[in-house]
Amino acid sequence: MPNKPLAHRMVTLIAAEYLAELMPIEYFLGSTIEQVIAAQATLIYQDVNDRDYYGAALTTATETLIAINTHQPLRQRYQSVAHELWSLWYGQTDARLLTTNFDHAKAACQVAAMAMMPAELMISTWLSFTAETTVLARVMQLADLAMVPYAAVVTRLFSLKIQVPPALSALTHDDWLVLRQELGVAPSPLDQIRLLSQFEALKTVVTRQVKHQQLTIARGATVLTPVEPLAAAELWSRQRQLIEMEMANDGLD
């Protein structure tokens, strides 16, 4: 089993190196996280009506594509984009973290939190609130400032050893919307969905990669299925034909 505390420290060190270059002075990246990702990869916007699907990363020999599902509140979308920092940075690091059981999903969450909610900035902002500001109101304001989900703020506060009621970690996005209304906090556009669709780039790249055998037919079809079902169906058909041909050839031997 990998040494989890050591792995956590290594992820922190690697992320700190890249973040120091990205923003020498700490600030809330917010919506600019999409520009950060777009500078290093091809960013594809999808509209998939599935609350459990946030997006996907596809790395080939020549390029990296980051697909983001825009069918989610803006604050969740920006957090989803930030998760892809790990997939980009990990590919540029050495083998210090290579273990068969390494939790890349957890590392992605850790890196996203560090990027979107810098430690010193979160702590100083938390301490700047007046004593009359309730914990709920502080979490809401931090979530709006950082443009991230409320749950992400609560998790980050826990990691920074800031005392907040443990029960807050059980609240859903809808729970927070109800609390905003009850507390009289103005609605935030970050809680709205802004649909975007930009599929052609993804289809073009996947088709080219499959043609040049830089991507398997099955992998290409899997990537295209949520956004280009007809193109994906064609690839699946090709895959079945190849399998049938192989089986037929095996029968002749």
Image (cartoon, helix red, strand yellow):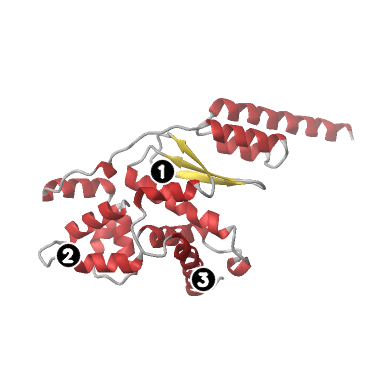
Residue at the disc numbered 1: 52
What's the residue at 63%, 26% (across, down)?
234
Left or right of 233? Residue 55 is left
Q: What is the x, y in percent for residue 6?
A: 51, 74
**N-terminal-most mark, 2 or 3:** 3
Residue at the disc numbered 2: 129
Left or right of 219? Residue 212 is right
**Please, what is the three-letter code of the amino acid marked with disc 3?**
Met
Q: What's the distance in space between the residues labelled 1 and 2, CA to CA?
A: 34 Å
Secondary structure state at the residue bearing disc 2: loop
* Contact flag, marks 2 and 3 (Cβ < 8 Å): no
Q: Residues within 10 Å of mark 3 (few under 14, many from 20)?
A: some
Image position of 76 with respect to 22: above or below: above
**Please, what is the three-letter code of the amino acid marked with disc 1?**
Asp
What's the residue at 48%, 49% (across, down)?
37
Q: What is the x, y in percent for residue 80?
A: 42, 49
Q: What's the distance in space between the residues labelled 1 and 3, CA to CA?
A: 29 Å
Q: What is the x, y in percent for residue 78?
A: 38, 48
Residue at the disc numbered 3: 10
Task: Say which quarter of the image contains residue 28.
Answer: bottom left
Report if residue 171 is visible in the image: no
Q: What's the distance in space between the residues labelled 2 and 3, CA to CA?
A: 33 Å
What's the residue at 56%, 38% (across, down)?
223
**N-terminal-most mark, 1 or 2:** 1
